[in-house]
Image: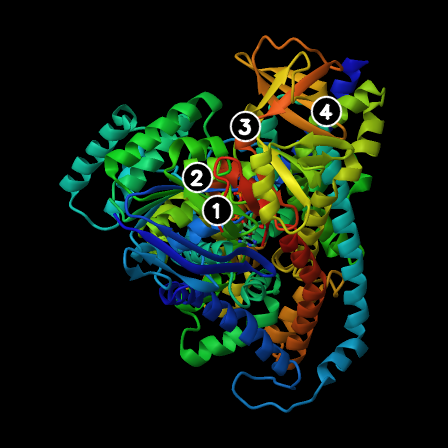
Amino acid sequence: MVIIRRFILYFILIIFALFMLFPIYSMVTTAFKTMPEIVGSRLTPPTQLYLGAFKEAFDSIGRPLLNSVIITVPSALIGTFLGSITGYVFSKFRFWGSDALFILIVLGMYIPAQAVLLPVVKFSANVGIFNTYLGLILPMIAFSIPSATLFFRNFYMNVPTEMIESARVDGCGIPGIYRRIILPLSGITFAVSVMINFTWIWNSFLWGLVLTQGPAVQPVMVAVNNLHGTYVAMWNVQMAGSLMAALPMVVIYAYFGKYITRGVLAQRK
Amino acid sequence: MSKVTLNGLTKRFGKVEAVKNVTLKIRDGEFVALLGPSGCGKTTILRCIAGLEKPDEGDIYIGDKMVTRLSPPDRNVSMVFQSYALYPHMTAFDNIAFPLWIRKRPRDEIREKVKKTAEILEISEFLNRKPGELSGGQCQRVALGRAIIRNPAVFLLDEPLANLDAKLRISARGELKRLQKQLGATMIFVTHDQVEAMTMAERIAVMNNGVIEQFGSTDEIYQQPANMFVSGFIGTPAMNLIKCSLVERGGSISLILDTNTLPVPDSIGRALIEKIKSSDMVFGIRPEDISIHEKNKPNSYKTKVYVVEPLGNEKLVTVEMGNTYSKVRTRLDFKQEIGENAWVDFDWNRAYFFDKRTGKVIMHGLNKSANRR
Amino acid sequence: MDRKTKIFIFLFLLPAVVGLGLYAYYFSGWNLSISMTNARSLIFPAEFIGLGNYERFLGDSVFITVVKNTAIFTVLFMGGTLLLGLLLAILIDQGIKGEGLYKVIILIPMAMPMVISGVLWSWMFSPRMGVINSLLRVLHLDFLTQPWITSTSQALLCVIIAYIWVFTGFVALLYLANIRSLPNEQSESARVDGASKFQLYWRVIIPQLRPATVMAFAVLFLNSLVAFDLVWTLTMGGPAGSSELLGTLMYKQTFQWNYFGYGAAIAQIMFIISMVVMVPYLYRSIRRR
Ligand SMILES: Nc1ncnc2c1ncn2[C@@H]1O[C@H](COP(=O)(O)OP(=O)(O)OP(=O)(O)O)[C@@H](O)[C@H]1O
Ligand SMILES: [Mg+2]
């Protein structure tokens, strides 16, 4: 009886795992196949490691990959830093309107991108940052702040206030306390927040779609979408491009998955 | 080192008046305890002195300088928090060095001073460990080290021994007292443990409900409590406080407790009568100032044993007289058991009489005119 | 607080306030004003037409389609994901070998960028070459092969399946964390009382999973409201508007057909829905701390 139960349990779990993994398996195998091979069979693994599709995909998304790095890294770092100082203030200081201001900042998380997209395009065009890295980095930073602020505030709430007061009596000012006490204590939290921001910025599509034109600044998700549109029947090229664009995420989740889920459990963009 | 003066200090949290019009003059180099029950405002006073709270009224002087409006870093005080508030990411060395480090003192000087401080506190072996790897007692000493390294004008300690286990706490009392003498420092510490206050401090400020009930030397607080609150708070077990009224009948003076009559020696009775306005009062006597006998003796008073608690070298007996219960400290060879009779008499020279309404002391036997206020 | 402290608090808050003030609040206000004009270009001035765009949207034939699609999508996607996620969490909670690895596996879809999930599922659902139909043919189940994303009756379903694929593992981990946070004594005491596994979950555990459900609901709702990336790469809202949602419609109206005012009005409706649902949620979750 117990054995049958266990068998059913594992059987269902394996079905779920197959459901989750099958599209990934298909992406990886298809990327290494030639088109004739794909026409022959979509399900079997490749018979050789054909890299032609990667080369072809890279011609289209190589530059956008670099663009994405240039956009994502500073946005994620600066967004996290700003979230951290904002969260620090809201966790340890109360002043007139602090609750309302905190809610307004965190609420930014729930403003659909669509609701500001058109004004952002107009504004960027007006001030001459349309189709530039800066034009994408600025909104990415701004929209990283709400969730990072909430994340850090919740973390800093657990830092004993006595510790901060002690530093105060010992002669530290507000920035000194941040730099010498708060920041060194934030290690993992800081890393997790950077990764969470990195993830959503890297994965974001709509912003790049409306704020860039042509491959010079275009982020990689837009390029993958274009690949999808241009190499319509060339599934191996599409899959190779997708694989390359998804790789940073896979790496991040492999290393930080545990922490990220913990953090993501708190909020998700 | 400096004297500390609080002048009409008041602090409110919304509707709660945590500290009410407190005036306190602490001398240079003095070791003072703020003693009182939980929530009476001890921590609040300490935090006001440190500059962590802004008083609503009144002024604070450190030395001759008014510091009421200065921010904590500018007051030259050190504070040891109840939780110690050590920085978990720094070693003991860095924790102790922190106040010098942020003042950008030269590295050699810092190393030298930390070394010396660690020697005084006997924690030289632990300097490379982080707080997580230290015991409670070691953490406490690191926190002290962080406070003394700066040589501040005043030390503020909030329940510095509360987080130690019972045995360590007793040895730490002595060490802290010795350290204070060695440094000659002005130290103000908060505690709700009267034994701790009595054993360590030179003077004690007994607080209740945001006001200072009495400020005096340990002897004064014990021998000449200003009111019922102080007398009930000091001593283990505390003074027996018995509601009674004073009557003069046929030339002899007695206390009436419920339906029982207790004759009072003439000299004391006469002095009392001169001072009272109403005959209702509270009679106070410490457990050690009552003697208890197994047999009736002249001038003693019959009671019933309610409970007996042996304490190793002595016994604590609770006796029932009418509806009131009193604790009595006695020898180990006292034999009566629960429910049996016992006879008590009082050392009238050590009796206290309080005004029932105001709680203030009317007089006590030791000094028949001891109406301090 | 002393002056220095006030100055630093001001400085520390300045970037967040300026950044969000501009990008979140000023621009959404601007969007509201665009939504009340008949703007068709970034340069030429437009006329104020009040609620004209909103009226037009409500009377538009596409409105019915979008409402219908959104309703189907939201209900099936959220319901399916919550149920499957809960089931998966309970199964994992039974104590399985390799739990750590299994958790990583079920979270992979969430790690995938939505655009790439869209590309992947369009490969899965491609009617002729596609993987699913190939699989069915290999299994000699030819009669089960479907037109999938090329069919007006199935395209939305394909989007829903892809979305369920993305979020199920995440929701399962949410539920699992909630289950694990319940005190062990509860299930032990229930066992002592003679409750079966089913009764244990049904009567004791599931009623206590409100926190995870509320959180999952918030995440899934927000994602279904603003859904765009995956839908765009998978079906582009087609064929013939059969998988059109607010996000795709807004994009087409605004950036493909240059009906700026009309697109802004649709975006504004998304904004309002989001606020109406999320503000109470946010208020609750902050108050609780
Ligand atoms: N930050 C605050 N906000 C509101 N009320 C406060 C605050 N700090 C203290 N109080 C109130 O002020 C009163 C005095 O508090 P305080 O902390 O000074 O007491 P304490 O004597 O140190 O007590 P304990 O022995 O429990 O530490 C209490 O009634 C407390 O509830
Ligand atoms: Mg206290």
Which chain is disc 1 placed on? B
Q: Amino acid at mark 2?
A: Glu
Residue marked by disc 4: B320
* Mark 3 and mark 2 on one chain: yes
Asked if the residue under mark 2 is in contact with the one under mark 3, i.e. CB atoms within 8 Å, the reply is no
For the residue pair C155 and A3, the one nearer the viewer reads as A3
What quarter of the picture does the N terminus of chain C occupy? bottom left
For the residue pair A89 and B275, the one nearer the viewer reads as B275
What crowding class fits label 4: few (fewer than 14 Cα within 10 Å), some (14-19), or many (20 or more)? Answer: some
Q: Earlier in the sequence, mark 2 or mark 1?
A: 1
* Mark 4 and mark 3 on one chain: yes
Q: Is residue B166 left or right of residue B70?
A: right
Q: At numbered mark 1, what does the secondary structure look like: helix, strand or loop?
A: strand
Kindly tell me whether mark 4's CB lies below 8 Å from ligand 1.
no
Closer to us: mark 3 or mark 2? 2
Asked if the residue under mark 1 is in contact with the one under mark 2, i.e. CB atoms within 8 Å, the reply is yes
Name the disc covering residue B220, or none: 2
Q: Earlier in the sequence, mark 3 or mark 2?
A: 2
Name the disc covering residue B214, or none: 1
Q: At numbered mark 2, what does the secondary structure look like: helix, strand or loop?
A: helix
Q: Residue B206 location in percent, x, y?
A: 49, 44
Rounded to the nearest angstrom, the CA distance separating label 3 from label 2 is 16 Å
Quarter residue B106 falls in: top left
What crowding class fits label 2: few (fewer than 14 Cα within 10 Å), some (14-19), or many (20 or more)? Answer: some
Which chain is disc 2 placed on? B
Q: Amino acid at mark 1?
A: Gln
Closer to us: mark 4 or mark 1? 4
Residue marked by disc 3: B236
Closer to us: mark 4 or mark 3? 4
Q: Is residue B228 visible?
A: no
Q: Residue B142 location in percent, x, y?
A: 33, 33
